[in-house]
Amino acid sequence: MINVKEQEQEKLWDSILTLASIDKEQAKVVLKVVIERSLRSVGIFTPFVSSIPLKLPDHKHVEMLKSLEKQVIKHLTKKEEDKAYELLVEYIDVLSDLTESDSKIIRRRLIASILKDKSQRTASGAYRLAERKAVTSGISFSEETDVSSYYTPKEVSKKLGVSDQTVRRMCDRGRFPGAYQTDGGHWRIPKDSLVTTEAQDRKAEEVLQNIDAVNKEAGDVDEFDL
């Protein structure tokens, strides 16, 4: 049975095609948000996506990406990692074809950024271990370290559309490179570990609200009831 988050993601995919006929630039912003959510759903966190010069996908590409996304999640859920990663490579190939630049270069950079993310998360785990050792040795970690460069779990939960409890569990599992806990036990998450910028998030939210308003006026609330 499809859950609410999956339903929202599918509607976001569909909204790209509708929005493309209204405002192409805004449609591209939403496209990047959808791709971010798609990759995060399979544990991939790469800020490189926000810098890719994407062109708008046609119906065929949207359906391909939607289908691959579902298949990757399904195989990961079943612990069939080899098949899941094989399909993930295909997802990256399709995504690379949507770039306005050289698709081969974008593909290499995407893969490189994914590998870098994995390395950083491994290092993040080592950092947390060192932090625990420091605490037991009486070394104090600052309650706030350049707070303007970090999100709280609540802020990240709103950005990703999940609960703050889920975000804290993601922190515990090393999902956010560079995330740390203060002396008071509060998680702080680096802003640069999230793919889209705050400006892109605000723009995407504004666009989706406008779509929803138009649909309500037309009496077609369900199609984009986000």
Image (cartoon, rainbow, N blue to C red):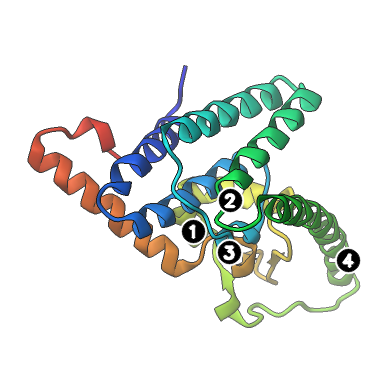
Whole-angstrom CA distance, mark 3 to mark 2, is 24 Å
- Mark 2 touches mark 1? (CB < 8 Å): yes
Circle 4 Cα neighbour tier, 10 Å, few/some/many (<14 / 14–19 / ≥20): few
Apparent side of residue 85 relative to residue 65 in the rendered image (left or right): right
Rendering coords of residue 74 (x, y %):
63, 22
Sequence order check, earlier mark of 3 and 2: 3
Q: Secondary structure at mark 2?
A: helix
Sequence order check, earlier mark of 4 and 1: 4
Tag 1: amino acid: Lys
| Residue annotated with mark 3 | 51
Q: Secondary structure at mark 3?
A: helix
Sequence order check, earlier mark of 3 and 1: 3
- Out of 108 and 70, give the one closest to the viewer: 108
| Residue annotated with mark 4 | 130
Whole-angstrom CA distance, mark 3 to mark 1, is 26 Å
Q: Residue at x 37, y 43 (%)?
A: 16
Sequence order check, earlier mark of 2 and 4: 4
| Residue annotated with mark 2 | 167
